[in-house]
């Protein structure tokens, strides 16, 4: 708990109500959010403590292509609940409102109704509010975020080849990219058309 002291409304100073991992140290407290969580700048990175529990908040940078440890200068919570974090060496970061609520969806061997691609390599919004997914098992699924159900549309879309990208166009046709072909799928008719490397799209 080294490096942090909490001042109560009555003026008393106390040790923080959270316990840090062994060897961790708080360099500064940047913000207390509406949920009562304390945003902390620690020796190993960004952290948040709430209800006596501490957890690290790992940050990944697409520019650096890996995890980063910015030097924080301040934090702000906007009216929508988003968290803004300023740093001297990694720009301005924004965590969307309700950032703490998320779900992880994966392929479960014993659940035939789960996503069928263990490695999801491509996603696209669907006109019905769902999300198209393709990936390493060559399957095309559509996930409904409201119900949590997975619509399994096509298995082995391009044989044993991985599917790397997917997009739904304005007409509702779903375009799927693979390493050796471009495919077009009609969700209503369940029809699939394929163009190989040597074919011209027409």
Image (tube, rainbow, N blue to C red):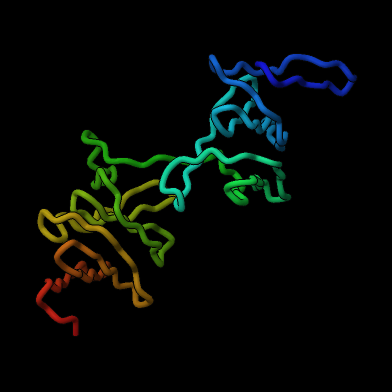
- What percent of the width, then of the height, locates residue 115? 28, 46
Q: Quadrant of the C terminus?
A: bottom left
| 41 vs 133, nearest the viewer | 41
Q: Is residue 180 above or below residue 31?
A: below
- What percent of the width, then of the height, locates residue 193? 16, 72
Q: Quadrant of the N terminus?
A: top right
Residue at 77% over, 21% down: 6
Is 8 on the left-hand or right-hand side of 121? right
Q: Tell me the quarter of the picture where residue 16 sits.
A: top right
- What percent of the width, then of the height, locates residue 199? 11, 78
Q: Is residue 82 visible?
A: yes
Residue at 83% over, 21% down: 8
Residue at 65% over, 22% down: 51
Please, which residue is most extreme toward the front here? 89
Please, which residue is most extreme toward the right here? 10
Q: Is residue 100 above or below residue 4?
A: below
Is 84 on the left-hand or right-hand side of 191? right
Q: Tell me the quarter of the picture where residue 50 sits.
A: top right
Q: Is residue 83 visible?
A: no
| 140 vs 25, nearest the viewer | 25
- What percent of the width, then of the height, locates residue 112? 22, 41
Numbered circles on residues, count? 0
Q: Tell me the quarter of the picture where residue 157 sits.
A: bottom left
């Amino acid at each position: 708990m080294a490096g942090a002291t909490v001042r109560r409304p009555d003026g008393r100073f106390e040790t923080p109500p959270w316990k840090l991992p062994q060897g961790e140290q708080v360099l500064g407290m940047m913000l207390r959010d509406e949920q009562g969580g304390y945003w902390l700048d620690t020796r190993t990175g960004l952290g948040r403590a709430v209800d006596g529990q501490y957890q690290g908040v790992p940050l990944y940078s697409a520019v650096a292509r890996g995890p980063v440890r910015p030097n924080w200068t301040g934090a702000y919570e906007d009216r929508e609940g988003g968290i803004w974090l300023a740093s001297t060496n990694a720009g301005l970061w924004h965590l969307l409102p309700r950032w703490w609520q998320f779900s992880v969806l994966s392929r479960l061997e014993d659940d035939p109704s789960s996503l069928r691609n263990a490695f999801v390599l491509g996603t696209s919004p669907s006109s019905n509010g769902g999300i198209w997914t393709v990936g390493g098992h060559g399957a095309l699924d559509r996930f409904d975020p409201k119900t949590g159900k997975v619509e399994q549309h096509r298995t082995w879309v391009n044989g044993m080849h991985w599917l790397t990208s997917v997009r739904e166009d304005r007409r509702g046709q779903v375009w799927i990219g693979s390493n050796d072909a471009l495919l077009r799928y009609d969700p209503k008719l369940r029809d699939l058309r394929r163009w190989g490397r040597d074919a011209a799209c027409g």
